[in-house]
Amino acid sequence: MQVSMKYFLKSTCYVFAVFLILSLAATSSLAHTVELATGKTVALEEMVDDLQQARVIFVGEDHQEVGHHRAQLQIIKALEKAGKKVAIGLEMFRTDSQQALDDWVAGNMITRDFLIIYNQNWNMWGIYADIYFYARDRKIPMVGLNISRDITRLVARKGFAALSEKQLKKLPYVQCRVDKAYMDFIRRALGGHKGQHIQFKNFCEAQLLWDKVMAKNLSDYLLKNPDKTVVVLAGGTHSWKYGIPAQLAEISDAAYRVLLPEMPDKLVRETISEKDADYLMIGVDKAPLH
C-alpha cells in the first residue's frame, strides 16, 4: 500500500510539472515579428497599424503547422478589432465550391455537411477548424481562390501545353520564364513536395498557374467588394511576393502586405529580405504571436 501511495504521489508531481511547463510555454513570448525593411522587431499592434493601409494581407503558412494557423487567426481578429471589414481568401477552397463557403458563413450548413465539401477541397480540418468557426460566428466572408486540383496536377506532370483546348480557353497563359530568385525558391519548394522527380519546368508552370488564377479570383472579389480587406491564407510558396502578390500587381493596383512564418530550409531570417515579404513571423510554430 505504501509503495502504491508513493507511486501515486510521484506520478501526480510529474503530471503537475508537465502541466506547469506547458502552461508557461503557452503564455511565453517566444513568437515575434520582424519588419524586414528595417530589421526591427515590431509588436502586433504596430504591425496592424501598417496592415490597415493595405487591401490585401497575405499570411503564409506551412499547412501542417498549428501555430501558423493560430497566428493567422490572431491577425484576422486584430484587423477586425481595428475596425476593418475583413474577408478571408483561401487557397484551400476552389471557386466551384464557393456556395458551400457562403452557406457555412451564413449558418445555413451544419458542420457534418460542410465537412463533406471541405474534404473534397482540402484536409487537416482539425488544425483549420478554429478559423472556419470564427468566420461563421462573426459572419466573415470566406472566398475560394483555387483552381481544380486535376488541372494543376496535369500541368505539374506534363506541362501547361498538355491541357485541352477547352481548358486553355478558361486559363491565363503561363510559361516558366522567371528570375533567379523565383527559380531558387521554387526549387526549394519542389524539394518539400511529394513527387520530387517532377520536371522543374512543369512544376514551375503549375506553380505559376496556381498563382495567376488565385490572383485573378482575388482581383475579381476586390472589384466587387470595395469595402473589404482580404486576408489571404495560402502556403508560403504562394504567399511570398514573387507568388500571388506579383501576379495580383499585374492586374490590380490594390495595395498589399506579405507576412511569412519562418520555416527551416525554406524561409529563414538569414536568407529572406523585404523583396520576399514585408514581415517575418518567428516562433509562431511554438507560441501565439505577440
Image (cartoon, helix red, strand yellow):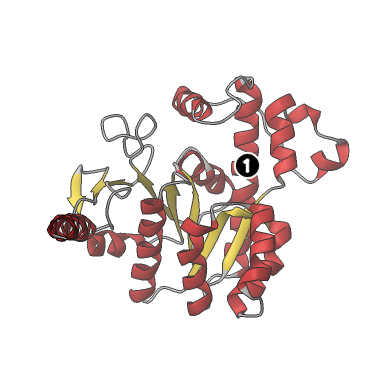
Q: Residue at x 70, y 35 (%)?
A: 153
Q: Residue furthest front?
A: 1
Residue 208, x across and y down, in percent: 61, 36
Left/right of residue 152 with respect to residue 137 in the rendered view: right
In the image shown, does 129 or 94 lie closer to the viewer? 129
Q: Residue at x 54, y 58 (%)?
A: 125
Q: Inspect the image, locate mark 1, and give the three-letter code of the amino acid beneath it.
A: Trp
Q: Quadrant of residue 201?
A: top right
In the image shown, does 158 or 67 lie closer to the viewer? 67
Left/right of residue 169 with respect to residue 105 in the rendered view: right
Residue 196, x across and y down, in percent: 57, 23
Left/right of residue 122 with respect to residue 231 in the rendered view: right
Q: Residue at x 63, y 22 (%)?
A: 198
Left/right of residue 279 with respect to residue 86 in the rendered view: left
Image height of 242 relative to 221, above or below: above
In the image shown, does 212 or 118 lie closer to the viewer? 118
Image height of 41 relative to 45, above or below: above
- For the image shown, how many numbered marks are present on the structure? 1
> Which quarter shows the C terminus?
bottom left
Label 1 residue SS: helix
Q: Quadrant of residue 12?
A: bottom left
The residue carrying mark 1 is: 210
Residue 141, x across and y down, in percent: 56, 71
> Which quarter shows the N terminus?
bottom left
Image height of 256 relative to 240, above or below: below
Q: Residue at x 37, y 77 (%)?
A: 83
- Is any atom of residue 52 visible in this view? no
Image height of 31 relative to 161, above or below: below
- Is any atom of residue 140 visible in this view? yes
